[in-house]
Amino acid sequence: MQLVTGNCLAQLPPDGPVDTVRVVPCDDEHAARVVSQYAFDQDAVWPGQQAADERVAAGCVLSADEAAAGDRLVTWAPSEESWGRGDRTGLCLVATP
């Protein structure tokens, strides 16, 4: 299953490749929520991991309320391996303290 805007995650995995996460109702205690998605063009050529990470991160912004609450941004970009399988979606997550 692909994560989409509005999903909440029970816990954030450590930095690095993400294989699986547990989605929970957002009314339950959660570590992060997906707040937006970045769509790479389906015909795009793999830009390299750093460029993919930077493009996704450039589209992620905390609201003033989120920043004041101490929330932080977490961005996930496709890896070269997932890109090869057709993954063209980056995610912006807000992690709560």
Image (tube, rainbow, N blue to C red):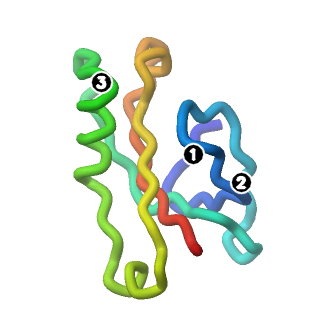
- Quadrant location of the C terminus in the rendered image: bottom right
Q: In the drawing, does residue 46 fall left or right of residue 3?
A: left
Above or below, 55 against 70 in this view is above
Give the percent coordinates (x, y) of residue 88.
Answer: 38, 29
Above or below, 61 against 16 in this view is below
The disc placed on residue 42 is 3
Q: Residues within 10 Å of mark 1 (few under 14, many from 20)?
A: some
For the point 33% across and 77% down, the residue is 63
SS type, badge 3: loop
Give the percent coordinates (x, y) of residue 38.
Answer: 33, 45
SS type, badge 2: strand
Above or below, 95 against 88 in this view is below
Q: Mark 1: which amino acid? A: Leu
Whether residues under marks 2 and 1 lie with C-beta atoms below 8 angstroms apart, the answer is yes
Q: Which of the two discs, 3 and 1, labels the residue nearer the N terminus?
A: 1
SS type, badge 1: loop
**Separation (CA) of disc 2 from disc 1:** 8 Å
Q: Which of the two discs, 2 and 1, labels the residue nearer the N terminus?
A: 1
Q: Which residue is mark 1?
A: 3
**Separation (CA) of disc 2 from disc 3:** 26 Å
Q: Residues within 10 Å of mark 2 (few under 14, many from 20)?
A: some
Q: In the drawing, does residue 18 fall left or right of residue 68?
A: right
**Residue 23 in which image quadrant:** bottom right
**Residue 73 in which image quadrant:** bottom left
Give the percent coordinates (x, y) of residue 68.
Answer: 40, 87
Give the percent coordinates (x, y) of residue 27.
Answer: 71, 77
